[in-house]
Image (cartoon, grey):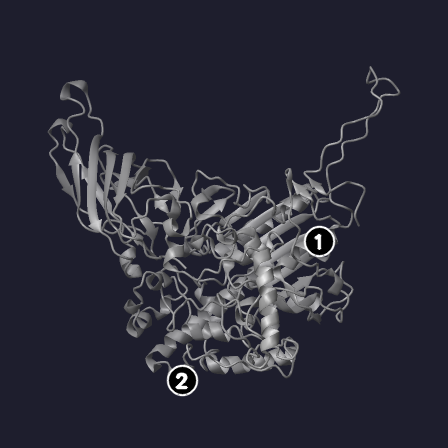
Amino acid sequence: MPDAIQRGILPIPDRPYSGFVAYDAKSPDSGFPPIEPLRPPAGAPNVLIVLLDDVGFGASSADGGPVSMPTAERLADGGLKLTRFHTTALCSPTRQALLTGRNHHAVGMGGITEIAASAPGYNSIRPNTAAPLAETPKLNGYSTAQFGKCHKVPVWETSPAGPFNAWPTGGGASSTSTGFIGGEAHQYYPAIYEGTTPVEPSKTPEEGYHFMEDMTDKAIKWVRQQKTLMGDKPFFVYFAPGAAHAPHHVPKEWADRYKGKFDQGWDRQREQTIERQKALGVIPADAELTRRHDEIPAWDDMPEALKPVLIRQMEVYAGFLEYADHHVGRLIDTLQDLGILGDTLVYYVIGDNGASAEGTLNGTFNEMINFNGAAAIETPEFLTARLDDFGGPDSYNHYAVGWAHAMDTPYQWTKQVASHFGGTRNGMITHWPNGFRSSGELRQQFHHVIDLAPTILEVAGLPEPVSVNGVQQMPLHGVSMAYSFDDADAADRHETQYRWELYDTTSDWSQAHDLAEEQPDKLHELQRLWLIEATKYNVLPLDDRVGERINPDLAGRPVLIKGNSQLLFGGMGRLSESSVVNIKNKSHAVTAELVVPEPGAEGVIVAQGGSIGGWSPSTATTCWASSASTSRATGPSRPASIRCGWSSPMTAAGSARAARSACSWTARRSARAGSAPPRRWSSRPTTPATSAWRAVPWCRRTTGRAATSSPARSTGSRSTSGTTPPTPTTS
């Protein structure tokens, strides 16, 4: 229940002491009330939001899908299962909407951050009139933390120079965070940040590393520590795995659990799923299975030689999703062990949009090949040869469109299609034993991801803030779901959410029948309502451009590095793709100046990207030794300065195997630095770089047969690119 503290203005203004102050602290009249740490109102629960990635309504066993998710089923048995819960059809918009309680266009996220434009609804900038959801509990006495995927940071703010206002900790919402900033991550070699500091995985894939396990370990550690040190203080945790977004990375034994379970193909899978959905009651008994559109091939029309690959793609995806659910279960078990699960409001959102159809008609071993326009490389023979490597560290895999469609059963279409439930309806489970009188029941009220924020504030007894950090706030756009917790028959309160096409979803559950031609008056009525809502929430102008949105100059999106050259120095650390001058598909030249230690060195000069794609010089590199730095009379020589340069008419990334090559160099100094002639050093393959720039090459100092790693000293590396327009490299 709300308390006497005025919590509408955040931070809560301090109140000066206004009582009697004695001259002497020993005076019997001297005394002050004890210091009381800020806490939320009594009875405010812990909050755990779990948001999975790219999981359609027809995937989870909790909703009749083929993927075993025992944690989701367990929470549903002890909580409530929402059957009409909706997202936005894309990653960044759903996350921005969920974590602000406002419609995504109103908070600048009409698309993913990588295609931001200058229009207010699409600029990827959260206005300061919409404070993050987590900041309200934090400023009211909650502990806050975030783990996993972010994908809300404007791309020009992803560098080590910040600003960090949109980062999980930098924006004031979370006290701690561990995860990745962009839209996806290599689960075996992720680019992780703790707060705003880049960190490397603690072990290798060969030693058992996987990001899903790692982020769960860190979340468990944080919760245990928080409850040990501040047991009376509730927490707000946002837990957002990269699963099951591509790449579908999972230990082989988890994928092997599904051997033979998808041999029937995606068309038969849809038929099996809808029957289970009806049996569970998550869709009505008369719901229709929507037709497969002509753009999606039938299973029977796929080449027989390709089918073993297609089957393995789905086995790997299913294993990845179950693996994620397993680790969510570890976190739930921790809450149970600590005795706090009953007093924790859990939201398990099974997908931030529908299943992803970004894997092409045939699926892919490395989705970056397709994004770079080279999908023809991945022939059936190419894919078959890598069958056993799907889901492993050398892959960056994605399944075929047909599987994505099947994982959205019974609805039409997939992720990216906001007009149909295949892109926007997701499974959702909420669990709060000490707060619900009901359990193991369904709730069929219409709700949207923006409804989580007002629900959390209501059950915590916190008012919607009028002002945060001195800035007046726009109202929340969502509707609290608390009215339906104990009333299955309560009428819908979320009545309007802008969409297109015309379906009577009271009788046509799966949007199988478009009524636009039959009811033109109703269509026009809703089109008018849509236009009103679109104007209200910054949806206009509608923008379906592709090339223009990718090119920042045309889109009006800032770029961090201006011009066509950049000078990098040693010690700059991890640099994101947007932190470096763009040389993709452009003629360019790179020059590196290095100092070679005694008696020589070898290592990568420069590399961008990693095993999945990127670049580094793969042809001979020319290096020149400096003039004399010492003479024989003054003692031992100092390291010689080396200048290396190369130029290339770079093209898009080739195969994953070719992308693993990085430029390596070896330097053997002459006995007398003063006599060192210009030399040519050759490149050779080395271990793959990680998915970010390394401004300092890590070299190996060799002495006889022994070797120890040490950083080479770099005086600078300059890249210069041409002016050819870039092409897309990520989704």
Residue 550 at x, y percent in the picture: 38, 55
Q: Closer to the camera, 617 or 341?
A: 617
Q: Which residue is mark 2?
A: 300
Q: Position of residue 345 (x, y in %)?
A: 69, 57
Q: Nearer the viewer, mark 1 or mark 2?
A: 2
With respect to residue 365, does 711 lie above or below?
above
Say if residue 30 shows up in the picture.
yes
Mark positioned earlier in the residue sequence (1 or 2): 2
Residue 370, image x, y percentages: 34, 64
Please report the residue visible at 45 percent of the width from the left and 72 percent of the height from the top: 314
Q: Residues within 10 Å of mark 2 (few under 14, many from 20)?
A: few
Q: At label 1, which amino acid type do we have?
A: Ile
Quadrant (top left/top right/bottom left/bottom right) for the C terminus: bottom left
- Furthest toward the right, the residue is 28
The residue sitting at 75% across, 70% down in the picture is 488
Rendered image quadrant of residue 438: bottom right
Left or right for 54, reference 63: left
In this image, 730 relative to 152: left or right?
A: left
Amino acid beneath label 2 = Asp
- Looking at the image, residue 47 lies above or below residue 508: above
The quarter of the picture where residue 652 lies is bottom left
- 168 or 413, which is in the foreground? 413
